[in-house]
Every structure is written in structure tokens, then in C-alpha cells.
Amino acid sequence: MKRIAQNMTITMYIAATVSGMLFTLFRVYLPGVPFILSHWSYGMLAPFQSYLTYNENLLALGRHSKGVWEPIDMSTYKTHGKGEESIKIYLPAYRGLQEEGLHQKYQEYADLLRKREEEHGRLWDEIILEMHRWPRSPAGYEYLRVPVLTEITPL
């Protein structure tokens, strides 16, 4: 019985690997292999398949009663590092929502940020979130983050 289980495990691993290779190279699936196994193997075989050619960052801006907008330092409220932050800015738990639903979640994010800022004595009349995108550069992360090359998407 143990031998049968081992053989089945090895067979599924080989099938998943072959299916992942077929999907990586030709975008075809191996019939009979569950989707989740194919994509697990695909992810292992092609780790740089989703490499982006641009940098993105979530920016919060607060408006004072004087009408002046200022960037808000959100690092105070982050409990994770830069790598995890690069994923969290997209609110991955809500990616299945339609655009309106995702916009609402970003609004909730801004409202929570306003509350945290108030707790630290910083009062804002309004807070908006923007996604900034700029080209990558061998000279560094921020090197090409200049107004002419930065695309800004209001959230």
C-alpha cells in the first residue's frame, strides 16, 4: 500500500512537471492534470514570467484646510518589508472585485489612514491615494521617477 502511494506521488509530480513545461513553452495543458498542479509547476519553472519593466508605488496625499496637498509618510503604519509591500499595494485579497468594488476598498484604506493620522495628531480634510508608475533603471529604483516619466493613476 505504501509503495502504491509513493508511485502515485511520483507519477503526479512528473505529470505536473510535464504539464507545467508544456504550459510554459506552448501554452497548452496536459489532459487529466488538475489545473492547480499545472500552475504550481508552471510557477516553479518560470519564476520571472511576470517580471515587470516598470516600478510602481502607492502614494497617499493629504489636503490641509489651507488647500495644500502633501505626501503622507505611510511607513509608520507598515508592519512588513519592501518586498511584501510591493504586493500589498495592489490589495490582492480584493483583486476579484469589479473596478467599483476595488475603488471602494482603496477608499476604506484611505479612511483607515486618516484615522491613524488623527491618532498621531495629523489632521487632514481629505486623503487621496494614487498609484505611481515609472520605468525601471539600472541606476536605481527612484532614478527615473521624474514627472515626465511618471504615470499617475488616481485610486
Image: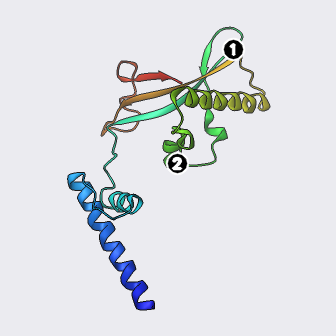
Residue 64 percent location from the top left of the image: 69, 14
Residue 19 percent location from the top left of the image: 28, 63
Depth check, front residue: 28 or 148: 28
Q: Is residue 57 left or right of residue 150?
A: right
Residue ID for mark 2 = 84
Q: Secondary structure at mark 1?
A: loop
Q: Is residue 55 left or right of residue 103?
A: left
Hey, which quadrant is residue 30 in on the image?
A: bottom left
- Alpha-carbon distance for marks 1 and 2? 30 Å
Name above or below for residue 4 compared with residue 36: below
Name above or below for residue 124 compared with residue 89: above
Hey, which quadrant is residue 2 in on the image?
A: bottom left
Task: Say which amino acid is labelled 1.
Answer: His
Residue at the far front in the pictured view: 32
**Residue, x 74% and y 25% (percent of image)?**
122
**Residue, x 69% and y 28% (percent of image)?**
111
Q: Give the numbered dot on residue 64.
A: 1
* Mark 2, other Cα within 10 Å: few <14 / some 14–19 / many ≥20: few
